[in-house]
Image: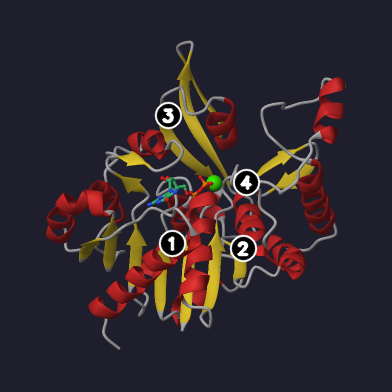
Amino acid sequence: MRIVVLAGGIGGARFLRGLRRAVPDADITVVGNTGDDIHLFGLKVCPDLDTVMYTLGGGIDEERGWGRADESFRVKEELAAYGVGPEWFGLGDRDFATHIVRTQMLDAGFPLSAVTEALCDRWRPGVRLIPMTDDRVETHVAVESDGERKAIHFQEYWVRLRASVTAEAIVPVGAEHAKPAPGVLEAVAEADVVLLPPSNPVVSIGTILAVPGVREAVAGADAPVIGLSPIVGGAPVRGMADKVLAAVGVEATAAAVAEHYGADLLDGWLVDAVDADHVDRVEAAGIPCRAVPLMMTDVEATAAMAREALALAREVRPA
Ligand code: GDP
Ligand code: CA
């Protein structure tokens, strides 16, 4: 079975671990979000690609959910001693090596997709990880501060400001001219099922879908497209997705996120058991919907979610 997953960082990575457990023999292609990418200290940092790579490769810091296990921050301390920031973005010593290797390869002329493949040679994530595009896309957030409207990098909004100022618009800068990375459209076209994990619908999956051709390919795929809600009981399970949903005029509920993706994209939607009362609304929008446990408390619980998603795929599109 060929499965394509459009993934952000922590939510996507944790789901993928469960999916791998649920279908160990499946051929899984992950299209990763690169809208979170940022240049720091002269290095290209790809937080979502790395979260997927480290999580599936066994190198993640489980507690934080990002960065390397057994990490130290001595380089960052030394940089701070020179007054060189930003101090608000956590880059650990072990993590630095990844960004150095990536930047060297990019500078040598390799596209990000080839670089990601090379990094995965070490991590063996058990999936094929492709960035959504080899072109530069950076999500910016329009905010109003001191009566002035300005656009800031997504990481500044998310990590430095903890989404504490109102986001008025989310703009994936560069997306309109970006091309899907080699293999992305092919994987979608050949997939038996496409899954939208419980990743951020705006700044993770929304950004991937903003690359011209991707949304069209997913919506038009022969394969059923099944999504899992990142919103449970009217709030994100983790993080501040409600803030970026508000910026695009979507309420933070499991049903509203399904409607936001739309019946043209989704062939099925899973909401958490606590949101069982949302099922009728989602189905009224033309999207088959089931309520099942959606808390990724451990790998086995997550594998059960993946099985439910695949079961719904078979139900809506019997082979
Ligand atoms: P990020 O790039 O690290 O922010 O990660 P993603 O975009 O892949 O995923 C973030 C989303 O994962 C958040 O909106 C969370 O609500 C969601 N999430 C995290 N843990 C869980 C969980 O256990 N269950 C569900 N349903 N969603 C989760
Ligand atoms: Ca992210």
Disc 4 crowd, CA 10 A, few/some/many (<14, 14-19, 20+) = many
Label of residue 80 in the image: none
Distance between the alpha carbons at the discs numbered 3 and 4: 24 Å
Name the residue carrying label 4.
66
Disc 3 crowd, CA 10 A, few/some/many (<14, 14-19, 20+) = many
Apparent side of residue 256 relative to residue 26 in the rendered image (left or right): left
Label of residue 167 in the image: 3
Label of residue 302 in the image: 1
Quadrant assignment for the C terminus: bottom left
Give coordinates of residue 79: x percent, y percent: 84, 28
Q: Which residue is drawn at 41% across and 46% down?
A: 202
Front of the two marks 3 and 2? 2
Name the residue carrying label 2.
56
Distance between the alpha carbons at the discs numbered 3 and 2: 32 Å
Whether residue 220 can be seen here: no
Q: Mark 4 and mark 3 in contact (Cβ < 8 Å)?
A: no
User: In terms of secondary structure, where does tag 4 sit?
Assistant: loop
Q: Residue at x 80, y 32 (%)?
A: 76
Apparent side of residue 194 relative to residue 109 in the rendered image (left or right): left
Choose the circle earlier in sequence order: 4 or 1. 4
Q: Residue at x 17, y 51 (%)?
A: 278
Distance between the alpha carbons at the discs numbered 2 and 1: 14 Å
Asked if ligand 1 lies within 8 A of label 4, the reply is yes
Choose the circle earlier in sequence order: 3 or 2. 2
Q: What residue type is labelled 4?
A: Trp
Q: Which amino acid does label 2 sit on?
A: Leu
Asked if ligand 1 lies within 8 A of label 1, the reply is yes
User: In terms of secondary structure, where does tag 1 sit?
Assistant: helix
